[in-house]
Amino acid sequence: VTVFSMTYEEFTDLAFSNFSIDIKSAKELFCFWGMLFELSNGDLVLNPQQLADVLACVFTKEPDKIARMGDTANGILWHRDSIVEAIWGDTSKYPKYLWSFESTTSIIPTPEMPPFVNLLHRAELGYPLYGPKGVPLGETFIPALLPQEPTEYSSTLSSLVSV
């Protein structure tokens, strides 16, 4: 099982079970040295370079890749395997269970969210979208992917209004 991050509590449990050290100081040193990265929600990424590689797949400027990524040019990541496969589908780098919505393995933290999409949400780089009645739209809003200039009207916005 590939683990990209853990909660601060999991970190302290691991540290206390293996070492008798000042946990806060150790965490700060590991973050300073680049061995850990603390997300805005307090979770700790165990391999910051791997996180950067995963996120670089989403925040890309490659025109070919962007064309295959649906409406991401307007800040929307559709929850479809065809879209996330264009982003993370290189199985030599990332096993399918980490990004696929079709995966049914118990390794996924929530049944509807693959770990990579869940990571975008936990890192507060993306936000799941819901309709007026609280029904999930199957899309993630990623502010960093919004165009520099506002666009006329997005097909995704029409789905927000009609749900």
Image (cartoon, grey):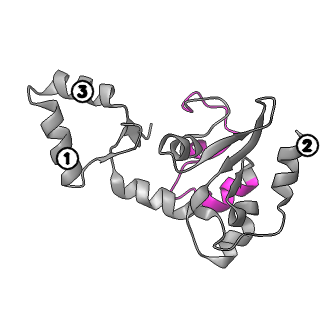
Secondary element under disc 2, as helix, strand or loop, is helix
Toward which corner of the image does residue 25 lie, by quadrant?
top left
- Mark 2 vs mark 1, foreground winner is 2
Three-letter amino acid code at the position of disc 2: Ser
Residue placed under numbered mark 3 in the picture = 12
Left or right relative to 144: residue 136: right
Closest to the camera, between mark 2 and mark 3, is 2
Q: Secondary structure at mark 3?
A: helix
Left or right for 73, reference 106: right
Is residue 40 at all visible to an observer of this figure?
yes
Residue drawn where x is 55% and y is 48% of the image: 95
* Residue 162: mark: 2
Task: For label 1, count other residues whose C-alpha is less than 10 Å away and answer few (under 14), some (14-19) or many (20+).
Answer: some
Please state the horizontal and vertical placement of residue 98, each as a whole percent of the image. 56, 44
Measure the alpha-carbon separation of dots 2 and 1: 48 Å
Q: Is residue 97 magenta?
A: yes
Residue 46 drawn above or below residue 92:
above
Q: Residue at x 68, y 33 (%)?
A: 112
Residue type at the position of mark 3: Thr
Q: Position of residue 163 (x, y in %)?
A: 88, 38
Residue at point 61%, 44% (across, down):
127
**Circle 1 is placed at which residue position?**
30
- Determine the residue located farthest toward the right in the rendered image: 162
Q: Nearer the viewer, residue 88 or 156?
A: 156
